[in-house]
Amino acid sequence: MGYCRNCGVLLPENSRFCPSCGCAVSNNGVPVGTQPDRGHYSPDSDLEFPISVLGYVGIHILLAIPVANIVALIVWSFGYSQKKNLTNMARAILLIYAVVLGLCLIIFLVALSLGEL
């Protein structure tokens, strides 16, 4: 027995294909890995790969544009097939914006009720 080199699942003895991902084990039935490969990224999906430094520079330049930043954050937060770290960053920024907007609204209402405005 061994582990699938593609997904890290424990392979049954004399298996030719991984029962989890369907990857071929080897020509003679010997499993290709002796330990699970936990750090493997799927080559057909880049959801787990980090954003490059230039990617972050471009993101922050786009976020400096007044209306485009909210639209971009909403698309990145709830759009389809985005990188996970971009989705998480956009959701965190939207959450911070919502908290700040809520605090500003509370301060405005308190000031309005005290007759300061």
Image (cartoon, rainbow, N blue to C red):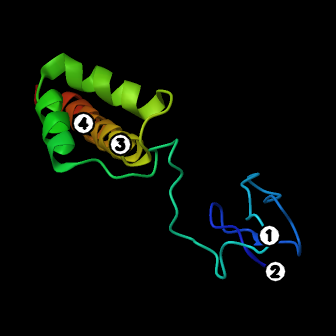
Residue 28 - label: 1
Q: Earlier in the sequence, mark 2 or mark 1?
A: 2
Quarter residue 104 falls in: top left
Instruction: Tell me what residue is drawn at x 20 percent, y 28 percent.
Output: 112
Instruction: Tell me what residue is drawn at x 74 percent, y 73 percent.
Output: 31
Horizontally, is 75 left or right of 80 in the view?
left
Q: CA distance from mark 3 to mark 2?
A: 39 Å
Quadrant of the snapshot with the C terminus: top left
Give the image location of residue 39, x and y in percent.
Answer: 50, 68
Q: CA distance from mark 4 to mark 3?
A: 36 Å
Q: Amino acid at mark 2?
A: Met
Residue named by callout 4:
110
Give the image location of residue 40, x and y in percent.
Answer: 52, 63
Q: Considering the numbered disc 2 on the image, is that residue within a helix, a strand or a loop?
A: loop
Quarter residue 67 falls in: top left
Q: CA distance from mark 4 to mark 1?
A: 76 Å
- Relative to 112, say whether 83 is above or below: below
Q: CA distance from mark 2 to mark 4?
A: 68 Å
